[in-house]
Image: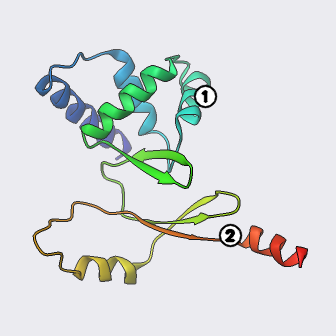
Amino acid sequence: MEENIKDTVKQILTEYLQKNGHRKTPERYAILDTIYSIKGHFDVDELYSYMAEKEKFRVSRATLYNTIILLIDAGLVIKHQFGNTSQYERLYNNETHHHMICTCCGKVSEFEDDNLKQAIAQTKLKGFYVSHYSLYIYGLCSKCMAAKRKKK
């Protein structure tokens, strides 16, 4: 299943690059492959380290940033702004999920709630077609809440 997804996203990228007159470089495909090997969110530094350590493929941070922008435009990656940091995750074939962001430590947790999904799916947005969505809930994680109680 995972290999089928990787083949599909490579095809989508190839078509996007051809359509938009971009070069098909091995770096772009290696970055795409690595992103689709990562479960969950990542930032550019994590992607850089992952590629260098696990994939044994070195690319510059500039190449990573430029390629991620290209992958966002191609609809293969989504950018999240969690507080002061930008994080990314794969977009194709990614289940809709929600995010809890701790305003103290910055920890991002994913969760799914069928009632929320159903409520959002049933919401009629006049003159607007929903392709996907992200829900961010800000607050304190249990660890930070415990630390805050301990201080008092």
Q: In the picture shown, does residue 12 fall above or below 92?
A: above
Give left or right: position of 4 versus 110.
Answer: left
Where is residue 43 shown, x and y percent of the image? 53, 40
Q: In the picture shown, does residue 92 fall above or below 114?
A: above
Q: Quadrant of residue 5?
A: top left
Task: Name the amino acid, label 2.
Answer: Cys
Residue linked to disc 1? 49
Where is residue 58 shown, x and y percent of the image? 53, 16
At a point 46% along the width and 39% down the height, the residue shown is: 37
Q: Nearer the viewer, residue 29 or 67?
A: 67
Give left or right: position of 7 versus 45.
Answer: left
Where is residue 13 shown, x and y percent of the image? 24, 31
Where is residue 68 shown, x and y percent of the image? 38, 33
At a point 14% along the width and 23% down the height, the residue shown is: 18
At a point 49% along the width and 42% down the height, the residue shown is: 38
Q: In the picture shown, does residue 45 fall above or below 4?
A: above
Disc ID at residue 97: none
At a point 36% along the width and 61% down the height, the residue shown is: 95
> How busy is the neighbourhood of tag 2: few (under 14 within 10 Å), some, or many (20 plus)?
some
Residue linked to disc 2? 141
Give left or right: position of 145 versus 7.
Answer: right
Task: Name the amino acid, label 1.
Answer: Ser
Q: Mark 1 or mark 2: which is in front?
A: 2
SS state under label 1: helix
